[in-house]
Amino acid sequence: MGNKIVVPFGSQHIALPEPVSFLFDTKNEIITDVRVDVGYVHRGIEKAAITKFEFTNVAYLLTRICGFCSITHAGGYHHGIEKLLDVEAPKRAEYIRLIITELDRIHSHMLANAHVAEVAGYENLFMQGVKDREIVMDLLENITGNRIQYDIYTIGGVRRDISKETAEYIKKQLNKLKDKVLKVYDFYDTDYTFGLKTKGISYISYDDAKKYNVVGPIARASGLATDARAEFDYLPYDELGFEVQTRTEGDVWARNIVRQMEVVHSIDLILRAIDNLPEGDIKVKYKGRPKGETFVRVEAPRGECFYYLKGNGTKVLERVRVRVPTYSNIPILKELFVGEKYSDAQPIVLSFDPCMSCTAR
Amino acid sequence: MGFFSKFRKKSPWILHYNTGGCNGCDIEILATLAPKYDIERFGALNRGNPKQADILLVTGPVTKNCRDVLRRLYLEMPEPKVVVAMGACGHGGGVFRHLYNVENGVDNIIPVDVWIPGCAPNPRALIDGIVEAINIWEKKSKDKEYMKNHSKDMIKNLGVNDD
Ligand code: SF4
């Protein structure tokens, strides 16, 4: 019998881009208990959204909840406020929004997969993933003007149009990207040693996923077909033939595969959207102040993001409530650690792709 | 003297800490470490250990929970060291200025040498900032050179002249 040893992981750690602290109680390398502190990033954004900012520019604050999901937060807020103000964005704007949202999902998923590969010991694969991802970042910079915080959403439409040349460029680059992604997909799928490190680790069954209310790629890797893109009508996904991607294995490996499948599917969606881009305006005017309450569900790269907005007819909103995907995934994450080896802790954390800036806000 | 500083400037190691911004800047740091921008050309590696680090790369507006960790990381780093504050919210808080849990910028906690503006800064701007940081660090290193009186033969063997 070994002694009990407490191993800290975070808040500053090479594998973590964000501060979060895990304290693992281990015995003979097996984790017996874990304590999590996610509060390092708390800034008080929900409070500021209802005291310091007017409804026209609170979106700048809300998109800066998180860099990966900035477009998700922009989407959640703008779809809600448009319902309250009773304006409808033109079709072309909706399509441009969809294109940016899916590009964002692609770059987030590619980085998440690359990160899992890195902590599983494949540094080369990490570099390859991040290199391919630059194609997407390049496209985002081309369309919106910035690489991370796009701020392309505005109330009643979008700020920038996609020109003919840009559309051609996007198509060319995405076809190139698709080949590269399929190659890496093949590696994840068939490589024997990568399978040894990831298959069967931190298994979540279908029933557990349901019981703990897991969302996003983690749920879809366990066979639970939940996706706000299919369940809630906010962007023209059905027109483009969106399908939910699922696997049934429920381990670290399956999560990577689901994300990779979604990347491929998102590329298809964008290509279809570019081909069917409607003509017309990209912005409509709006009048009045937000009054009443509403909610929106949008699909972030990590799962379903829920927005609740309440306005009282003044310039400042009365309540902004955000529930983010990582928050609903933390309960099961704690359960999963117990009984696993400490050396697997990093792949488990990163296969969940946790986003602490979202969770603590 | 320029004995250690001569070699030291070839491998500035980076310690990166996010003090509560959105992770936009951290994504750009990852992108800068990867092949397209490749900060390793300058010998810079991202290592998660303050005892081996030379450049502290801070992002975010410094939340109250992160404040003590940041201060401790700074104190644990060996001299000479350079602090780089990245992103608009490191500069006085940016969009998070005067929120109740925020300390309004990195320089309220530790001294900062290089500022990289932007939200999020482009990787090209980040590379520019790191190069600037390396220059400052080399200067600090020369000023603080502690091994002043080593023998003439040793210098000759190593081919390092006095400067
Ligand atoms: S400067 Fe902007 S992108 Fe960078 S961490 Fe702050 S809010 Fe995020």
Image (cartoon, coloured by chain):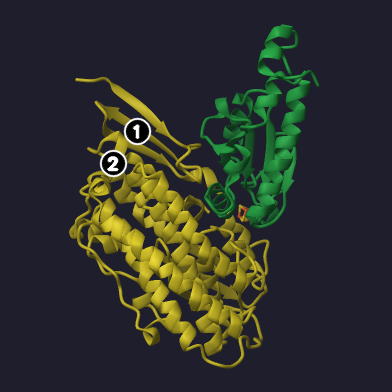
Report the disc number at residue A101.
none
Residue B163 seen in render? yes
Answer left or right for B36 relative to A57. Answer: left
> Which is nearer the eye, A354 or A328?
A354
Disc 1 and disc 2 in contact, CB within 8 angstroms: yes
Report the disc number at residue A24.
1
- Three-letter amino acid code of the residue under disc 2: Phe
Q: Is mark 1 within 8 Å of ligand 1?
A: no
Chain B visual colour: green
> Pointer 2: what residue?
A337
Question: Same subunit under labels 1 and 2?
Answer: yes
Chain A visual colour: yellow
* Dot 2: chain letter: A
Answer left or right for A72 relative to A53. Answer: left
Q: Sort mark 1 into few (<14), some (14-19) or many (20+) by Cα contacts within 10 Å.
A: many
How far from the left and from the top, in percent, is residue B134? 70, 36
- Three-letter amino acid code of the residue under disc 1: Phe
How far from the left and from the top, in percent, is residue B92? 73, 48
Residue drawn at x 70%, y 42% is B131
Residue drawn at x 66%, y 48% is B127
Q: Secondary structure at mark 2?
A: helix
* Dot 1: chain letter: A
Judge whether A86 appears above or below A332 on screen. Answer: below
Judge whether B147 appears above or below B69 on screen. Answer: above
